[in-house]
Amino acid sequence: MQALYVKTGCPFCAKVLVNAAALGITFEEKNIADPAVAEELIRRGGKRQVPYLVDGEVEMYESDAIIDYLQKKAAAVPA
Ligand SMILES: N[C@@H](CCC(=O)N[C@@H](CS)C(=O)NCC(=O)O)C(=O)O
């Protein structure tokens, strides 16, 4: 399961979620409104910024980079 750190009302998070849904990808959504989740994000990535993707060994900030990664991953999956 892929996890996406998000924040309610974050347009960059919404952009990732819309693009992921179009690819049939869902996430465990972790909302940094919970201070414990925000601390977890900072421990993992080094800063408080969402969206942040965790997919196995791959972890990244930046909505455009996340969308690019998800599109390439979806394209690589054999039909
Ligand atoms: N360039 C980044 C911008 C991300 C961004 O600005 N995220 C905001 C929320 S919309 C953020 O994490 N702010 C810190 C906070 O809300 O604590 C991206 O495209 O992902």
Image (cartoon, helix red, strand yellow):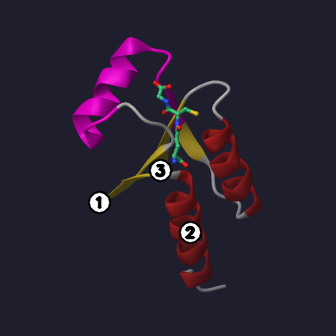
Q: Residue at x 46, y 23 (%)?
A: 32
Q: Nearer the viewer, mark 2 or mark 3?
A: 2
Quarter in which the C terminus is drawn: bottom right
Q: Residue at x 29, y 60 (%)?
A: 57
What whole-number distance in Å separates the C-alpha atoms at marks 2 and 3? 18 Å
Is residue 16 depicted above or below 48 in this figure? Answer: below
Tell me if label 3 and label 1 are in contact, CB under 8 Å.
no
Question: How many callouts does the rendering have?
Answer: 3
Q: Mark 2 is on which residue type?
A: Asp
Position of residue 40 measured from the top left corner of the image (x, y, whole percent): 30, 28
SS of the residue at dot 1? loop
Q: Residues within 10 Å of mark 2 (few under 14, many from 20)?
A: few
* Disc number for residue 11: none
* Disc number for residue 57: 1
What whole-number distance in Å separates the C-alpha atoms at marks 2 and 1? 17 Å
Q: Nearer the N terminus, badge 2 or badge 3?
A: 3
Determine which quarter of the picture holds residue 68: bottom right
Give 62 or 58, whichever is nearer the viewer.
Answer: 62
Q: Mark 1 is on which residue type?
A: Glu
Q: Residue at x 39, y 54 (%)?
A: 60
Identify the residue position indicated by label 2 in the image: 68
Identify the residue position indicated by label 3 in the image: 1
Q: Nearer the N terminus, badge 3 or badge 1?
A: 3
Disc 1 beta carbon < 8 A from ligand 1? no
Q: Which residues are magenta?
A: 29-47
